[in-house]
Image (cartoon, grey):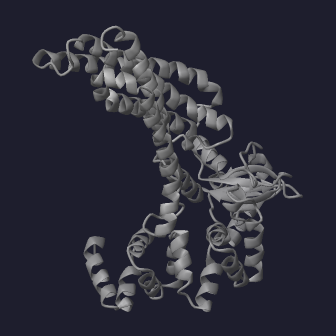
């Protein structure tokens, strides 16, 4: 029966408290459908439903939930259930959960693990936070170069169930150093009598356990891999990283950058699950900084108060100037930040980007400048709102727009490079921050151009 027909029955059963019936129905569901249902339930309902499905299905679904949701479910489990779930989880998913828990709770969960699993968990947690070591799993297939293809296949049949993936087989020497990575298809298509050394090319890609997780994202994207080996500083194979964990990192990084581009700290938790006070704290800091920055705009306007009093018509275009400069700067910053994140450009490309944005800024400024010029000119044919010197006002607005848009574009494209060079996250130069910076300098450009063009007439 299609899933859209089953959903009302399951939800109705859950609402009525008949979780046994709901469990019977969802046992035949695909894993992603069960996860989708769970994410729309209250924690108590999630736990009640998980108790009604086979343990393997429950543990698989539990592993795919967000760490914050897993933490809440752990609080509803019995000790026996905690032992079962934690010991059956894959090492990499368990590491993500343990590092999200408070220290005391994390130690408590470690105490529930079997000795072998605890040793694995503690070894992974010893790696630096946000390192590749926290992402990897020690469950992989490693063989020796002297083995025959037949021996390799026998080894895969015996130990394959305990590995994270069967896509790749790794070749190590006597001291555990990685010397090659091979696809399983190479062994499936080769004669059983051939040795591993005859199939090897000794060319492989590997990550270091202490590398930053962003390194894994870039390497997986560049090499189009689904799994990569992880070695320690001595070159010994210590684990593997699979694409599902890398995609989670990429999603977290993208979410963090989007939050920063919006002018706030990254939430680090799902929107509907973060506490009210934490969300306010995450948003208030940037808002206060931007507010203080915008106060400089009021200061700049006060500096040009005399000009505004003599030519009130200039005040009509202040919002236009501020928004145009801020918008152009935000566009440029967003484009460059994303290009840096995708490694489309590097620090060495700053001059090429600058030249490109100079031309873009001039072209975009010219477009807006012409629109502003013709707008004032057309309005002046039917009214005297801009006074007898409307042509000079139109020229002032047109030229200022070119200057402000150019300045905003240059600021937006250069600031991410400066922050990257200083070791900061380029996303910190968020669109609101660039807009605030350009607002203040835009006013200076506007009134400076006005002073030159309108001198002797309105000023």
Rendering coords of residue 62 (x, y %)? 52, 75
Task: Relative to 72, say whether 306 is above or below.
Answer: above
Q: Quadrant of residue 150?
A: bottom right
Rendering coords of residue 21 (x, y %)? 35, 89
Q: Residue at x 53, y 38 (%)?
A: 337
Res 121 visible: yes
Q: Nearer the viewer, residue 48 or 168?
A: 48
Rendering coords of residue 77 (x, y %)? 55, 87
Q: Quadrant of the C terminus?
A: top left
Task: Relative to 76, say whether 443 is above or below.
Answer: above
Q: Residue at x 23, y 14 (%)?
A: 390
Q: Residue at x 40, y 70 (%)?
A: 36
Q: Is residue 159 left or right of residue 221?
A: right
Q: Is residue 32 left or right of residue 148?
A: left
Numbered disc total? 0
Q: Nearer the viewer, residue 26 or 46?
A: 46
């Amino acid at each position: 029966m299609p899933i859209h027909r089953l959903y009302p029955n399951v939800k109705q059963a859950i609402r009525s408290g008949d979780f046994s019936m709901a469990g019977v129905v969802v046992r035949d569901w695909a894993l992603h459908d069960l996860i989708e249902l769970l994410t729309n339930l209250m924690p108590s309902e999630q736990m009640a439903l998980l108790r009604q499905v086979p343990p393997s299905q429950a543990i698989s679904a539990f592993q795919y939930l967000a760490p914050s949701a897993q933490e809440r479910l752990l609080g509803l489990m019995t000790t026996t259930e905690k032992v079962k779930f934690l010991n059956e989880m894959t090492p990499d998913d368990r590491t993500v959960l343990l590092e999200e828990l408070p220290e005391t709770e994390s130690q408590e969960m470690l105490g529930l693990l079997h000795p072998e699993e605890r040793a694995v968990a503690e070894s992974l947690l010893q790696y630096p936070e946000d390192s590749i070591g926290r992402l990897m799993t020690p469950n992989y297939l490693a063989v020796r170069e002297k083995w025959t293809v037949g021996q390799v296949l026998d080894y895969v049949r015996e130990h394959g169930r305990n590995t994270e993936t069967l896509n790749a087989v790794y070749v190590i020497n006597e001291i555990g150093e990685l010397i090659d990575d091979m696809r399983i298809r190479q062994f499936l298509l080769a004669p059983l009598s051939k040795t591993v050394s005859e199939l090897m090319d000794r060319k492989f890609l590997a990550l270091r356990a202490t590398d930053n997780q962003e390194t894994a994202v870039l390497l997986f994207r560049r090499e189009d891999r689904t799994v990569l080996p992880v070695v320690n500083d001595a070159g010994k194979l210590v684990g593997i990283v699979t694409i599902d964990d890398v995609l989670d990192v990429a999603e977290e990084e993208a979410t963090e950058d989007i939050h920063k581009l919006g002018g706030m700290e990254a939430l680090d938790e799902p929107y509907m699950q973060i506490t009210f006070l934490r969300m306010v704290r995450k948003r208030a800091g940037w808002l206060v900084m931007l507010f203080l920055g915008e106060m400089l705009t009021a200061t700049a306007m006060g500096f040009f108060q005399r000009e505004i009093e003599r030519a009130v018509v200039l005040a009509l275009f202040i919002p236009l100037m501020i928004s145009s400069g801020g918008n152009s700067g935000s566009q440029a910053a967003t484009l460059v930040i994303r290009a840096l994140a995708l490694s489309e450009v590097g620090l060495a490309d700053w001059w090429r980007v600058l030249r490109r944005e100079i031309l873009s800024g001039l072209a975009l400024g010219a477009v807006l400048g012409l629109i502003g010029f013709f707008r004032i000119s057309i309005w002046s044919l039917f009214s005297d709102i801009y006074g007898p010197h409307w042509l000079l006002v139109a020229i002032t607005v047109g030229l200022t727009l070119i200057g402000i848009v150019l300045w905003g574009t240059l600021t937006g494209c250069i600031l991410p490079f400066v922050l990257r060079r200083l070791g900061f996250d380029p996303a910190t130069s968020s669109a609101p921050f660039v807009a605030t910076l350009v607002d203040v300098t835009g006013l200076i450009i506007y009134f400076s151009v006005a002073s030159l063009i309108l001198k002797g007439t309105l000023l």
